[in-house]
Image: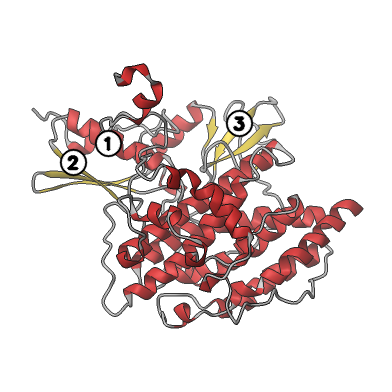
Amino acid sequence: MSSDDNPYDLLAEEHGEDHRWAFGTGFTDPLAGVDAAVPAGIDAAGLAAYCLMLGDDALIYSHRLQQWITRLPELEEETAVANIALDLLGQARLLLARAAAADPSLLPSGDGPGEDRLAFFRDEPQFRNVRLVERADADFAELVVRLLVFATWRLAVFERLRDGADPVLAAIAGRAVSELAYHRDYAAQWVVRLGDGTDVSRDRVRDALAAVWPLADELFARHPVEQALGGVAADPAAVRAEADLVLDTVLSTAGLDRPSAAPLGLVRGRAGRDGVHTEDLGYVLAELQSVARAHPDATW
Amino acid sequence: MVTRTAHEVAAATPDPELPPLTIADLGILRSVEHEGDTVVATITPTYSGCPALREIGVDLRRRLAAAGFARVEVRTRLAPPWSSDWITAEGRRKLAEAGIAAPRAVADEARGEAAAGEAARRGGPVPLSLLPARPEVACPRCGSARTVRTSAFGATACKALYRCDECREPFEYVKEI
């Protein structure tokens, strides 16, 4: 059968560089042409493990935000959440590509680009994201509360990474800082509107705080990977005061109390950064990875 | 036969999401250099997830090849990060012509006027903004300053949505970054 008989075969055919079937297909290395050498004195395996943490946070959270698309309360919020998810997906691609270049031994077997192999062919225990990002939001209030906590923490960490010893990670952070500040302000403004809104919106945002707060502690816990990467990694424990100041400012402006909920427990001392996740991650990965795994030779 | 310089050819590449503007107008094209017999074009992403970067790279290669440059390499440069301040005067004129408001300057506030300001910015936290922006963005159609932001985000990563209260038309604004 000639490929002309089936439009799907036509789509899948190898075309020249300048013929693709849709805008945005034909992904290339997001770090193409960037000097990938790890500077002397930096432990490449540690750097890769660190980029994997930060990249997995962005990848999994981006997917959770994408699941909101078509279900948000207003068109403006559709646009906002889609854009935030896109920014985070871009950050994830850069960070996973950096991890793959720094330590190729991390990569699952296969032929695809490193970022794809890391995203699609690792199993739950190999993901290093915090548990905060793998949970589905119960409602829009929970979305903006989770985004506020995540973006506030990540912005504070990335502000410091701009001066880190790995020039590639520093450059990725340099781009991401203004994106994260925009995400944080979007979430903060919504938390204020809901907290200072109606009885219903205030109840919802209080419930959201109670649900999200137990997962916040994990963000600020110093992991051995970060501890061993002085000068390259940002110490998450050191950003706590800055993040708390921002969160307290938002909560007091919104007329909300800081929750006193106890942190979600660890499993034998381990959590997301060690590959110990809640069952929610399995649902994210099933959706995220199923097409790539069913068609391991596919290109896009 | 090569009649135009590689830089001229590369600079004429349109942006896929803002087609009236070239990548040179937007400040995305960082450099075009000859390394031996290879033309090396270096581009910078506007946002981490900007899907247009790949399209720009493909288009750059195709245009340079068509202009007679046999060996072309497209490189990405991440640092310093792209700023909307890099949009040229010509780029701003074309934006206005297309009904899109050009970004306000960020150089004088967030980026620091002098080296000291720049150091302070890099060292310190980004200030929290709890009130929706009250921007002074003039309507690109009627010029009125009576405009409101209807959405902080827009159809592409680089734009926000506004409405003019004078002529009642909605318009896009390229965010300052």
Q: Nearer the viewer, mark 3 or mark 2?
A: 2
Q: In the rendered image of this protein, does residue A125 appear above or below residue A286? A: below
Distance from the alpha carbon under mark 3 to that under mark 1: 30 Å
Q: Residue at x 56, y 36 (%)?
A: B155
Q: Position of residue B83 (x, y in %)?
A: 44, 51
Q: Amino acid at mark 2?
A: Val
Q: In the rendered image of this protein, does residue B27 appear above or below residue B80? A: above
User: Residue B171 got which mark?
Assistant: 3
Compare residues B51 and B119 and report the one nearer the observer.
B51
The image's colour scheme reads secondary structure
Q: Residue at x 44, y 75 (%)?
A: A233
Label 2 sits on a secondary structure element that is: strand
Q: Position of residue A143 (x, y in %)?
A: 70, 54
Asked if marks 3 and 2 fall on the same chain, the answer is: yes
Farthest top residue? A5
- Provide the chain ID for the residue under circle 3: B
Q: Are marks 1 and 2 in contact (CB under 8 Å)?
A: yes
User: Residue B72 got which mark?
Assistant: 2
Q: Is residue A32 visible?
A: yes
Q: Position of residue A159 (x, y in %)?
A: 50, 68
Dividing the picture into quarters, in which one does residue A49 lie? bottom left
Compare residues A209 and B116 and report the one nearer the observer.
A209
Q: Position of residue B111 (x, y in %)?
A: 49, 60
Badge 3 or badge 1: first in the primary sequence: 1
Label 1 sits on a secondary structure element that is: helix
Badge 3 or badge 2: first in the primary sequence: 2
Q: Amino acid at mark 3?
A: Phe
Dividing the picture into quarters, in which one does residue A153 lie? bottom right
Q: Residue at x 41, y 59 (%)?
A: A96
User: Residue B60 got which mark?
Assistant: 1
